[in-house]
Amino acid sequence: HRDLLGIGHLQTHQIHYLLDEAEQWVHLNRQPKKHNDALAGLTIINAFFENSTRTLLSFEIAGKRLGADVVNMQAAQSSVKKGETLIDTAVTLNAMRADAIVIRHGSSGAVALIADKVDCPVLNAGDGQHEHPTQALLDALALRTKLRERGREEFNGLEVVICGDILHSRVARSNALCLTALGAKVRFCAPPALMPEGAGEMGVDVFHDFDAALDGAEVVMMLRLQNERMKGQFIPSPREYRHLFGLTEKRLERARDDAIIMHPGPMNRGVEIDSNVADLAGRSIITDQVEMGVAIRMACLDVLTRRSRGVPGWDAQAQK
Ligand code: CP
């Protein structure tokens, strides 16, 4: 487990371990001075071949708060634009002796390909439609924090609806893997054209009717339409989509009275989620998700660089 390529590569005790490790960083990040020298002297490269606000910034902040030297490579300004291949780019980053490389790429499997060519840990910051493991971990931490506030310790039996463009969503995939591993019951809801074939084999219940999916839900996670990934699928107009699959105040009444509202961002307000729902005090944890993103990425960078820092690896410390 040198790399973090996907939730599918983690055992349940490792998911718990990363969530527990992140708690100390949540605490640090709430102090006026947010600094720890755990990664001092290390170089972290964030190589982003796709746009990002939350993931790129939070990985950068995470590395800096842990004392590492962090550099960002934006593909749009790199030699990728001159035709350099992914493997040559990976070999180039490796020659600079990075201690960890964080990669976002538009193609599923691209991050694993790079991991195979470099000597340091690689963290997947989202690869195509495959996985976005740190998103699922930060979602789990934000949710666990909210549940604990309400006196609930465990995810066991928690009814979670994930609604939106499931077909193109690495967030849905990583969250389904993570939440089911933690004991939650996940329902996927999407128009038929935006539901992957065989989704039911992931251990989730499949719905095409959002009202039915919401019945008794304790958590509702909304996803945007990924128009940039559509390949001929029928996309309803924003108005039609909101009518059928948008989380409105009225529709939310079908879920449990205190149902928790989540969205990984970026949001399209008024399409998949209405503003009065996205900003619902005490119920929406969307900004908590962003806050937890920094702490989770600190935990992942810390844990994955332990071997190179001569600190016992996480498997030695995680409870089996
Ligand atoms: N949730 C998420 O991955 O957001 P960004 O695309 O802004 O990083």
Image (cartoon, helix red, strand yellow):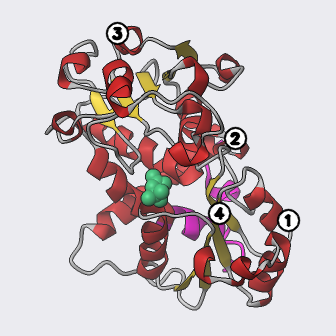
**In the rendered structure, which disc, 2 or 4, sits on the residue that comes first in sequence?**
2
Residue at 29% from the left image edge and 27% from the top image edge:
247
User: What amino acid is at disc 2?
Assistant: Gly
Residue position for label 4: 123
Instruction: Give residue 161's position: percent from left, percent from top.
Output: 43, 23
Report if residue 311 lies within the magenta region. Answer: yes
User: What amino acid is at disc 1?
Assistant: Asp
Q: What's the CA distance linking mark 2 and mark 3?
A: 28 Å
**In the rendered structure, which disc, 2 or 1, sits on the residue that comes first in sequence?**
2
Residue position for label 3: 215
Q: Which range is magenta?
A: 298-320
Whether residue 252 is situated above or below residue 5 in the rendered picture:
above
Q: Residues within 10 Å of mark 1 (few under 14, many from 20)?
A: some
Residue at 36% from the left image edge and 45% from the top image edge:
142
Quarter of the image that includes the C terminus: top right
**In the rendered structure, which disc, 3 or 4, sits on the residue that comes first in sequence?**
4
Residue position for label 2: 8
Question: Residue 1's quadrant in the figure?
Answer: bottom right
**In the rendered structure, which disc, 4 or 1, sits on the residue that comes first in sequence?**
1
